């Protein structure tokens, strides 16, 4: 495992973060095994949210933490202000929940249902540009001062709002944003899969270089696009086609497969290595559901892509 430093978090932070969006009671045995493997291999960050696993992930992680008695060894991320999501997995943007009072409500709900007395890192799931940055940041900072969270950040915020929030924190003398959590991958995404999600391009991602805010990427493997598992005959899920099925992305996939063959790995490894090989600190949230999937992710840490390979993969050059 490899580690990075994140502002406001004393422990070293593993670059692979275990995501829990897929957690559900029917898979509890597999979840416990997967969490055990993750920790055995040096992982120490678990990403939870009130609405993950159709609002069940927090309770499952609580059972695992109590069974293993290892809360003190881990970095727990929780998130607030997710839009309403119904048991069938449908997001309802008409019920948008980015408000200071809901930050507090979600925080206390999640502390109760995870059995934690604080979270190492607390993130907003979404943004609402109509809500002043000051109201959001003041509430997060107040909970940090209370000791309920150690650090805070945002997820799915456009870059100008992230910059505005950082400037506001500096003007107030706050600890400030520790993490920015958009999706970032080798693919270029045309249509977001869920309302309010932000897919960072390379310019957005590279903005983090030299700054004290760390990029945590979700869907760094482009929802499996670079595993080349989706048929191209029109039968792939429509949201996947709308997001990824474009000539430039298929060319990126082709180049990832080419480099993968040379290195003796899979194209999905090269896609993840693209994110982790950037010239700034990056952590990625993975959702491995088996030992095979996890081993594939951790194998990627051994792949170091050159600047020429990065440019080639991203179609900036035709040579490497």
Image (tube, helix red, strand yellow):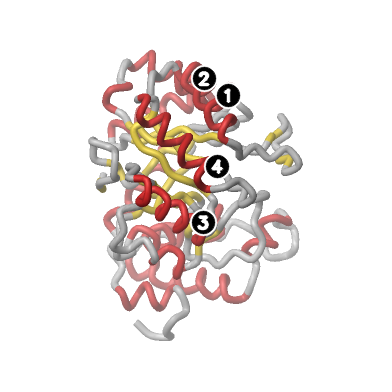
* Residue of label 3: 161
Q: Quadrant of the C terminus?
A: bottom left
Q: Position of residue 230 (x, y in %)?
A: 63, 58
* Residue of label 4: 125
The image quarter containing residue 292 is: top left
Query: Is label 2 in contact with label 1 (beta carbons under 8 Å)?
Result: yes
> Is residue 96 left or right of 271 when viewed as pictured?
right
Mark nearer the N terminus (2 vs 4): 2
Query: Alpha-carbon distance for marks 2 and 3?
Result: 32 Å
* Residue of label 2: 59
Query: Alpha-carbon distance for marks 1 and 4?
Result: 17 Å
Q: Nearer the viewer, mark 1 or mark 3?
A: 3
Crowd band around label 2 with a 10 angstrom C-alpha radius: few (<14), some (14–19), many (20+): many
Pick the front one: 105 or 155: 105
Mark nearer the N terminus (1 vs 4): 1
Query: Alpha-carbon distance for marks 1 and 3?
Result: 31 Å
Pick the front one: 87 or 164: 164
Query: Alpha-carbon distance for marks 2 and 4?
Result: 19 Å
- Any mark on residue 56, and which? 1
The answer, for residue 296, to whether it is visible in the render is no
> Is residue 122 left or right of 308 when viewed as pictured?
right
Crowd band around label 4 with a 10 angstrom C-alpha radius: few (<14), some (14–19), many (20+): many
The image quarter containing residue 119 is: top left
Q: Nearer the viewer, mark 1 or mark 4?
A: 4
Crowd band around label 1 with a 10 angstrom C-alpha radius: few (<14), some (14–19), many (20+): many
Q: Secondary structure at mark 1?
A: loop
Query: Alpha-carbon distance for marks 3 and 4?
Result: 14 Å
Q: Position of residue 121 (x, y in %)?
A: 39, 36
């Amino acid at each position: 495992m490899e580690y990075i430093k994140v502002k406001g978090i004393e422990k070293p932070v593993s670059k692979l973060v275990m995501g829990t969006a897929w957690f559900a009671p029917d898979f509890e045995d597999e979840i416990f095994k997967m969490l055990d493997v993750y920790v055995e291999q040096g992982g120490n960050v678990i990403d939870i949210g009130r609405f993950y696993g159709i609002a069940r992930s927090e309770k499952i992680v609580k059972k695992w933490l109590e069974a293993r008695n290892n809360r003190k060894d881990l970095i727990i991320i929780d998130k607030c202000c997710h839009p309403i999501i119904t048991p069938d997995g449908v997001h309802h943007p008409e019920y948008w929940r980015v408000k200071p009072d809901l930050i507090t409500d979600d925080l206390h709900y999640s502390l109760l249902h995870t059995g934690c007395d604080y979270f190492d890192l607390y993130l907003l799931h979404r943004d609402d540009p109509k809500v002043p940055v000051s109201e959001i940041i003041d509430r997060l900072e107040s909970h940090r001062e209370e000791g309920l969270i150690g650090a805070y950040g945002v997820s799915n915020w456009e870059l100008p709002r992230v910059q505005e929030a950082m400037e506001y924190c500096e003007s107030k003398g706050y600890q400030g944003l520790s993490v920015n959590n958009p999706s970032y991958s080798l693919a270029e995404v045309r249509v977001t899969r869920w309302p309010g999600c932000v897919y960072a391009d390379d310019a957005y991602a590279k903005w983090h270089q030299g700054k004290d805010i760390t990029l945590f990427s979700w869907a760094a493997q482009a929802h499996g696009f670079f595993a080349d598992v989706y048929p191209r005959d029109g039968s792939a899920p429509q949201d996947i086609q709308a997001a990824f099925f474009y000539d430039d992305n298929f060319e990126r996939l082709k180049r990832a497969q080419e480099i993968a063959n040379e290195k003796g790995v899979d194209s999905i490894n090269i896609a993840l290595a693209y994110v982790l090989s950037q010239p700034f600190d990056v952590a990625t949230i993975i959702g491995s559901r088996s030992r095979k999937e996890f081993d594939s992710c951790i194998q990627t840490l051994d792949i170091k892509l050159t600047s020429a390979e990065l440019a080639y993969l991203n179609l900036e050059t035709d040579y490497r």
